[in-house]
């Protein structure tokens, strides 16, 4: 009796590996792979906000210094050492204030005011001298003394007084103005002398006339108060 059968021989191919087989997860969601692209965002940072606030504060400081200010002068700041600047600041009287600020911020503060005449100075680096006294020569003298002592080439680049711009070559006019005491003596002498003396005094610059009249009023007040 012949027996017919199927002889099964082992396969030469290795059985399929199950190491990489994972059952499907019905809760998993596949997303297509995308390449990340860098997008440049420039939000307003804390640093830029502080910088903007600082600029606004500087503009307000300049505006505050312009109140009751008789003269605003620019001094070339390039070349100053920190120590020199500090020494000069300490040498100033209480009636003067020295500030270092960018030209753009100073101009923003003076724009639309009589101080805008200082526009020619808005180049280079400047220190700004605010004078809060009518004694202009005395206010400018500390820097001249400091300039001579330290042998500095830094000079005034300009100034505005009574709405008029004075360039570097015009400072002699400012530095030789009569003091208040000199004006008082002049007007009192004119009032006590011939009429022609008073006429000559009244033909002087407006500032001198005003100072003279103030002196005369003060004299009358002192005399009436003493009686």
Image (cartoon, rainbow, N blue to C red):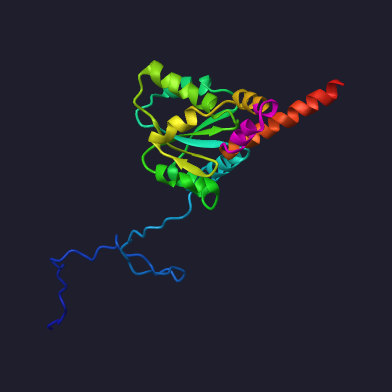
Q: Main secondary structure of the magenta part?
A: helix
> Is residue 63 visible to us here?
yes
> Is residue 49 visible to us here?
no
As displayed, is residue 135 above or below residue 29? above
52 falls in the magenta region: no
Q: Residue at x 55, y 27 (%)?
A: 178
Q: Residue at x 37, y 58 (%)?
A: 40
Query: Where the N terminus falls, by quadrant?
Result: bottom left
Q: Position of residue 216 (x, y in %)?
A: 72, 30
Q: Which residues are magenta?
A: 190-204
Question: From the viewer's perspective, is 69 left or right of 126?
Answer: right
Q: Which image quarter: residue 179?
A: top right
Find the residue positioned furthest to the right. 227
Residue 83 or 42: which is nearer the viewer? 83
Q: Position of residue 19 (x, y in %)?
A: 29, 60
Q: Which image quarter: residue 79?
A: top left
Number of dots carrying numbers: 0
Q: Position of residue 74 (x, y in %)?
A: 45, 36
Query: Where the C terminus falls, by quadrant?
Result: top right
Question: From the viewer's perspective, is 70 left or right of 117?
Answer: right
Q: Position of residue 77 (x, y in %)?
A: 39, 32
Question: From the viewer's perspective, is 226 left or right of 153?
Answer: right
Q: Residue at x 37, y 28 (%)?
A: 154
193 falls in the magenta region: yes
């Amino acid at each position: 009796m012949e027996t017919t059968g199927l002889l099964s021989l082992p396969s030469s191919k290795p059985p399929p590996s199950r190491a990489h087989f994972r059952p499907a997860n019905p809760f998993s969601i596949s997303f297509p792979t995308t390449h990340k692209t860098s997008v440049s965002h420039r939000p307003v940072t804390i640093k830029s906000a502080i910088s903007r606030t600082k600029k606004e504060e500087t503009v307000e400081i300049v505006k505050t210094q312009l109140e009751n200010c008789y003269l605003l002068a620019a001094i070339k700041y390039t070349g100053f050492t920190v120590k020199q600047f500090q020494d000069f600041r300490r040498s100033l009287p209480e009636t003067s204030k020295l500030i270092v600020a960018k030209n753009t911020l100073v101009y923003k503060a003076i724009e639309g005011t009589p101080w805008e005449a200082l526009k020619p100075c808005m180049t280079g680096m400047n220190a700004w001298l605010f004078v809060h006294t009518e004694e202009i020569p005395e206010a400018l003298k500390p820097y001249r003394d400091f300039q001579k002592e330290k042998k500095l080439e830094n000079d005034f680049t300009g100034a505005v007084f009574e709405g008029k711009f004075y360039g570097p070559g015009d400072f002699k006019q400012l530095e030789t103005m009569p003091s208040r005491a000199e004006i008082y003596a002049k007007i009192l002498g004119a009032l006590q002398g011939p009429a022609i003396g008073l006429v000559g005094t009244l033909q002087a610059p407006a500032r001198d006339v005003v100072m003279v009249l103030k002196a005369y009023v003060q004299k009358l007040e002192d005399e009436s108060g003493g009686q």
